[in-house]
Image (cartoon, rainbow, N blue to C red):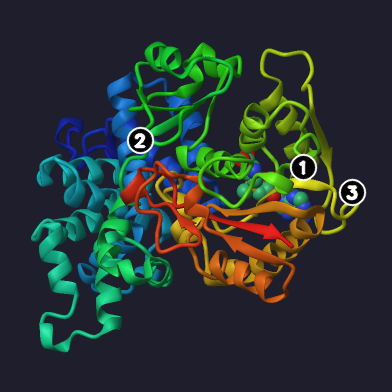
């Protein structure tokens, strides 16, 4: 027979003496950062597209939203370096950790090594987060590992993890150290080194610039640039006469952006359209005369979506020119029309179509100017996409080469004799830039113009004849430009 209820309570401790842990108070900015890391890991979400929604749902004030943004983007961006430090602080491989525990550890290590949050507070806040998202057992592990991380600052960790003796250094150990110091995969460090070529001494600066907070660039399309600058509290961009740089905040809060008198566009991207338009006359380029004979003919934008450069070409092309803007993806073509329309009811002289540039509906030799803004790895915009460097692989670049060659060949075929084709990428990777153009030139039928002459006011564009912009030199994305004149 079971003992009476009363008897079962005899040996129990009084409730006030139970050793239950205090309830965890949720720390919303860190929870938002953790949710972002989970989304990137579990469903391959893009950090820059996902965070605004998480911030909106959390209803954070500006200060907490800034903290959540700093913690999430910073942790994603520095992942490779944080993992190396965590691996050295743990008695088992990182791969044996539950992925959510690793996310929490990365978030904690980022706060300890990269923020002004005092290390003890960073550990306490992260252990608290661990208690709410992965449980009390893993929280103890998080506490132990993060305490080891606090034993050194970032520089001391980097020295600890890299070859200590200068005499042991090889080119490969230098690459490995730069990769660790600036949180880039080694294959991207090698690609940027190759793109810098004779300016290799700038490699550290080029990598460091990819970790800086990107400034938002606007383009003044149907509004005076100085007026836009005053309205949004920005600064005129140094290179493009249409550019305004704003320190932060959401550009879509500005009426000028919402009604499309202005748009969000990196100043480097603006320069690509400006350079192609400059081949019509100025800038010391071998144009004029018969080259301009068809200037009331067609300009073709072969990869136009979402339309930033097409909209600028529309502003810059002389009267009489018609613009054909094509993109293979129908929804991207629709975006082109929206970008160009702005406040207007129609899109005037721009015709937007959905078409595969590799199987084009237009005839050969019809265009005076062609823009081939090719799909690329995006390694030139790592500042803006914190997770991209860890998501991309060398195979992505290999896979893109055939498409890039095909699109440049299609662009050259579409241009008339004497016409100019601009080949543009938002990547400095030589396999996507110089090697594509050299492949095309080797087939004959076109010669390279000195593209630097199309941007006479922009310094340090490289050894030529191509243009390579850099975040650390120009404050723009690392855009590449070649201008090819068709024979
Ligand atoms: C770098 S984006 C172009 C950006 C655009 N020029 C701008 O400034 O807004 C490359 C575009 O190429 C398009 N694309 C990819 N393959 C294509 C193809 N075979 N033919 C035409 N467009 C293609 C993609 O849909 C994408 O919109």
The reply to whether discs 1 and 3 touch (Cβ–Cβ < 8 Å) is no
**The C terminus lies in quadrant:** bottom right
Between residues 467 and 252, which one lies in front from this camera angle? 467
**How many labels, in total?**
3
Gap between marks 1 and 3, in whole Å?
A: 20 Å
Measured Cα–Cα span from mark 2 to mark 3: 46 Å
Per the image, the residue denoted by label 3 is 362
Residue indicated by mark 2: 69
The residue that mark 1 highlights is 293
Residue at image position (72%, 75%) is: 443
Q: Is mark 2 within 8 Å of ligand 1?
A: no
Comes first in the chain, label 1 or label 3? 1
Near mark 1 (Cα within 10 A), the count class, few <14, some 14-19 or many ≥20, is: few
Comparing labels 1 and 3, the label whose residue is closer to the camera: 1
Q: Which residue is at the far bottom?
A: 168
Residue 79: x and y in percent read: 35, 58
- Residue 216 at what x, y percent from top left? 41, 32
Q: Nearer the viewer, residue 299 or 376?
A: 299
Visible residue check, residue 26? no
Instruction: Report the side of 115 relative to 265 (left or right).
Output: left
Q: Earlier in the sequence, mark 2 or mark 1?
A: 2
């Amino acid at each position: 027979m079971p003992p009476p209820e009363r008897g079962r309570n005899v040996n129990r401790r009084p409730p006030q003496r139970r050793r239950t842990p205090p309830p965890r108070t949720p720390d919303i900015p860190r929870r938002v950062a953790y949710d972002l890391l989970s989304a990137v890991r579990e469903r391959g979400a893009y950090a820059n597209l996902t965070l605004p929604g998480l911030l909106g749902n959390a209803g954070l004030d500006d200060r907490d939203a800034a903290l959540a943004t700093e913690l999430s983007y910073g942790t994603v961006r520095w992942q490779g370096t944080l993992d190396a430090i965590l691996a050295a602080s743990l008695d088992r491989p990182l791969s044996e950790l539950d992925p959510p525990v690793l996310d929490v550890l990365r978030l904690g290590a980022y706060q300890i090594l990269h923020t002004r949050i005092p290390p003890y507070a960073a550990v306490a806040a992260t252990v608290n987060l661990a208690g709410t998202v992965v449980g009390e057992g893993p929280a103890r592990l998080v506490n132990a590992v993060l305490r080891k991380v606090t034993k050194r600052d970032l520089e001391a960790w980097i020295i600890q993890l890299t070859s200590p003796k200068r005499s042991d250094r090889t080119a490969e150990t230098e690459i490995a150290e730069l990769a660790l110091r600036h949180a880039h995969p080694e294959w991207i460090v090698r690609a940027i080194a190759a793109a810098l070529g004779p300016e290799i001494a700038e490699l550290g600066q080029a990598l460091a610039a990819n970790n800086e907070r990107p400034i938002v660039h606007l383009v003044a399309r149907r509004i005076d640039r100085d007026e836009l600058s005053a309205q949004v509290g920005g600064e005129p961009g140094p290179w493009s006469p249409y550019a305004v740089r704003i320190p932060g905040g959401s550009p879509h809060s500005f009426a000028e952006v919402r009604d499309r008198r202005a748009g969000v566009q990196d100043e480097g991207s603006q320069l690509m359209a400006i350079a192609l338009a400059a081949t019509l006359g100025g800038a010391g380029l071998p144009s004029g005369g018969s080259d301009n004979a068809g200037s009331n003919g067609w300009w073709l934008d072969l990869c136009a979506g979402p339309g930033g450069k097409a909209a600028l070409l529309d502003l810059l092309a002389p009267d009489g020119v018609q613009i054909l803007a094509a993109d293979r993806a129908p929804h991207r073509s629709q975006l082109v029309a929206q970008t160009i329309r702005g406040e207007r009811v129609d899109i005037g002289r721009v015709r937007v179509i959905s078409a595969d540039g590799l199987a084009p509906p237009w005839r050969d030799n019809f265009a005076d100017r062609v823009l081939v803004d090719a799909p690329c790895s995006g390694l030139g915009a790592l500042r803006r996409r914190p997770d991209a460097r860890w998501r991309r692989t060398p195979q992505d670049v290999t896979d893109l080469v055939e498409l890039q060659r095909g699109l440049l060949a299609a662009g050259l075929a579409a241009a008339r004799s004497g016409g100019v084709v601009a080949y543009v990428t938002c990547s400095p990777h030589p396999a996507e830039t110089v090697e594509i153009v050299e492949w095309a030139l080797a087939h004959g039928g076109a010669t390279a113009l000195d593209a630097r002459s199309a941007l006479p006011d922009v310094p340090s564009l490289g050894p030529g004849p191509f243009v390579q912009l850099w975040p650390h030199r120009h404050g723009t994305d690392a855009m590449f430009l070649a201008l090819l004149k068709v024979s």
